[in-house]
Amino acid sequence: MILKPVLDLVNLIPRDLILPPASLFVVIAIGLALWRRRPRAARILAGGGLAALAVLSTPVGARLFVAPLERLTAPLQAPERAGAQAIVVLAAGRVLRAPEYDNRDIPDYFTLARLRYAAHLQRRTGLPVLVSGGNGSSGVDPDPDDRAWTKADGMAAALRDDFGVPVKWVEGRSRDTAENAAFSAAMLRADGVKRILLVTDAMHMPRARTAFERAGLDVVSAPTLFFSRQPLPLHSWVPSPEGMRRSWYALYELIGIAWYRLRGAGG
């Protein structure tokens, strides 16, 4: 109960302001603003922010956060012997109004990687598939009842049309991982499903697994996209958008894990 006011206050802070690179630019700006009054503190802030920005922008620097996070899970072995009753694949992002698909929203490349692995698992196991992801509506809805075209709708269309995999459940109300779990669990329990193969990125898996277990499901982790196991060529020491993207994602998930624990402790 003591933590609740603090958690509510933190929840008001924009996510991108907490994470790099925006948070580091804020630190650098504060350092520059203090340059005349507190030159020593200003140099520490501005220099530290710039150094952190340079390190986190490299794939090598990103691995400092990616590797420990990915070690919290492992590739799934022998999925056909896992005893699962369904495959659940979570949405990531989407491309809005893709012109080559008649201005419909389509899964982004992260979601497509998850869908590809879900299709691979479905062919090996024959299990029914649930896709989960909402976050509002946009694009063109092909359904006659004019429902909102959600991330889950786009995922289901990709699985059916592009991968030839049937989809049994479409959960399109959720706005975050906790709601992915809560709404998916309700749909699955209605059909007697208790044990699932959960498909998402390796970095996202620890937090996603916690959410689905809290929702009452028995979870078998089926992670994909292990970045920390890739070789690091010489150019991995050079700052790049991909390096910052991995750092952003890893730090987001690490903060998310801590947030889940605080929420649990705070009731």
Image: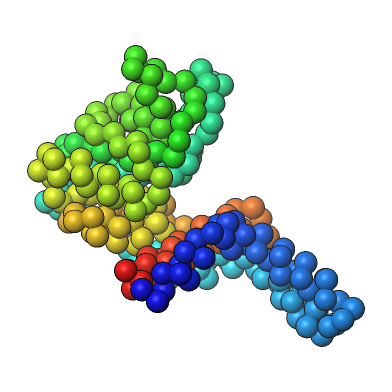
Compared across the picture, whether 6 is left or right of 193 comes to: right
State whether residue 177 is above or below residue 258: above
Quadrant in the rendering for residue 189: top left
Please state the horizontal and vertical placement of residue 172, each as a whole percent of the image.
34, 36
Is residue 30 shown left or right of residue 249? right
Q: Nearer the viewer, residue 5 or 86?
A: 5
- Residue at the limit of the structure toward the top, as seen here: 144
Residue 99 horizontal/vertical position (percent): 56, 21
Residue located 40% across and 49% down the image: 176
Residue 29 position within the rendered picture, expressed as x and y whole percent measured from the top left: 77, 67
Q: Nearer the viewer, residue 165 or 103?
A: 103
Relative vertical location of residue 38 with respect to residue 247 in this rendering, above or below: below
- At 13% from the left and 50% from the top, the residue drawn is 194
Q: How is the image coloured?
A: rainbow
Residue 217 relative to residue 145: left or right = left
Q: Is residue 72 above or below residue 194?
A: below
Vertical order, 99 against 72 (above or below): above
Whether residue 108 is visible to the viewer of this picture, yes or no, is yes
Count of numbered circles on the image = 0
Name the residue rendered at 37%, 67% in the picture: 263
Q: Going 26% across and 38% down the picture, which residue do you hit?
A: 130
Where the N terminus falls, by quadrant? bottom left
| Furthest-right residue in this view | 36
Q: Nearer the viewer, residue 141 or 9?
A: 9
| Residue 125 place in picture, x, y as percent | 17, 41
Q: Which quadrant does the C terminus fall into?
A: bottom left
- The image quadrant that residue 55 belongs to is bottom right
- The answer to which image quadrant residue 212 occupies is bottom left
Q: Is residue 224 shown to the viewer in this render?
A: no
